[in-house]
Amino acid sequence: MLRRVLLGVSRSPQIKKAVSAMPVSSGIVARFVAGETAPEAVLATEKLVSNGLNVTLDHLGEDVTDIAAATATADAYLTLLKQLSAAGLTANAEVSVKLSAVGQALPGDGEKIALENARSICHAARNAGTTVTLDMEDHTTTDSTLSILRELRQDFPETGAVLQAYLRRTEADCVDLAHAGSRVRLCKGAYKEPESVAFQDKRSVDKAYVRAMKVLMNGAGYPMIASHDPRLIAIAGSLADRAGRERGSYEYQMLFGIRPEEQLRLARDGQTVRVYIPYGEDWYGYLVRRLAERPANLQFFARSLISK
Ligand code: FAD
């Protein structure tokens, strides 16, 4: 309930303006966001990689409203990939891209613009020796994102997809994407969605997550289990064992700043673990989704606002 209210209220321009005025270094923002610049993101990557973790980096921003902003996002990824490569990090660090940040929602040719921008990022990633995963946004974009994924995979079959367990369609999408060479990140889903398309209560979402994991673990692709939920992490391990999967034929993923000890524990246990690092100036939408996931975060947030 609180989650839905927060996600709704966060659309107010006044609230966005007030919150965005907070410095990125302030408590709650710094907990979830690695900084505003590529060098800061590279530094955070170096630290995690030196602790045996892998990384996927997200240049923050979503729903761009003009071509110049879409191109600027693509350019930011090209700069980041160059810096990751120069730092010798691309064996352990890839990038995650939101298609709405590279033009998907622009009227008219938006989908084509997003495809071309994503293509140039995939190209740069391959030259740097790494990969791209397409983040998944709200349900109105799912078909478009999966269609762009199919196009990209013709030239870049290593491109990863994200599926959201809360969507009623996801089990069927898992069946479609559980083929050899297919990298699929499974998450619960972070947007406010109507009941017609998405399960609403935690129990139903968790059950749907397990059903989707079963399809992915028993399939021929590379499942990426993106969750901090201890129960789902344990079930993922059992399903992988039952499917006869070797370690390294699937991975765990968590967000920067959330359950860091668990990230290290899994890595020490010989599992592949990837941390999703967001960075950039446009951190508002990302922060709100993290606050909405956990009421306790709101206390830290309130303290950050007061000490501003
Ligand atoms: P929950 O039931 O929400 O949480 C389980 C436990 O994890 C909590 O009890 C708590 O201990 C901890 N926890 C979870 N969230 C927080 C938090 N914000 N602060 C503090 N502790 C927390 N969603 C999309 O819609 N599209 C995407 O492309 C996408 N990409 C993602 C990539 C990665 C690598 C990850 C890990 C998540 C991604 N998400 C994405 C977000 C995801 O959909 C969930 O909203 C988020 O992961 C919380 O769900 P959970 O599985 O951790 O379970």
Image (cartoon, rainbow, N blue to C red):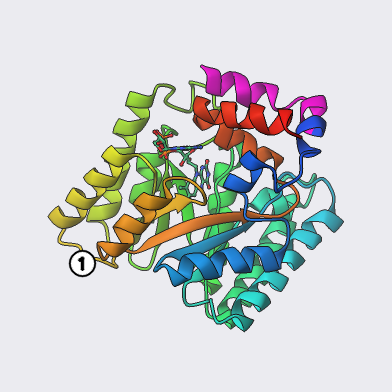
- On screen, 4 above or below 235? above
Query: Which residue is tagged 1?
Result: 246
Q: Amino acid at mark 1?
A: Glu
Prevailing secondary structure class for the magenta stretch in the rendered image: helix
Mark 1 residue's CB less than 8 Å from ligand 1: no
- Please give the range of residues in magenta: 1-16
**Residue located 60% across and 70% down the image:** 122
Q: Which one is nearer the viewer's eye here, 112 or 76? A: 76
Q: Place residue 187 in its image quadrant.
A: top left
User: Badge 1, how many Cα within 10 Å: few under 14, some, many 20+?
Assistant: few
- On screen, 189 above or below 96? above
- x%, y% of residue 209? 33, 38
Give the residue at the far front of this rendering: 307
Q: Which one is nearer the viewer's eye here, 26 or 38? A: 26
Q: Report whether 203 appears left or right of 19.
A: left
Quadrant for the C terminus, please. Answer: top right
- x%, y% of residue 184? 41, 56
- x%, y% of residue 109? 77, 52
Q: Which one is nearer the viewer's eye here, 153 or 255? A: 255
- x%, y% of residue 11? 72, 27
- On screen, 168 above or below 41? above
Q: Place residue 272 in its image quadrant.
A: bottom left
**Residue located 74% across and 65% down the image:** 76
- On screen, 229 above or below 197? below
Q: Report whether 25 appears left or right of 262.
A: right
Q: Report whether 25 appears left or right of 95.
A: right
**Residue located 29% across and 32% down the image:** 207
Is 227 in the magenta?
no
Indicate the secondary structure of the residue bearing disc 1. loop
Q: Is residue 157 visible?
A: no
Q: Is residue 28 visible?
A: yes
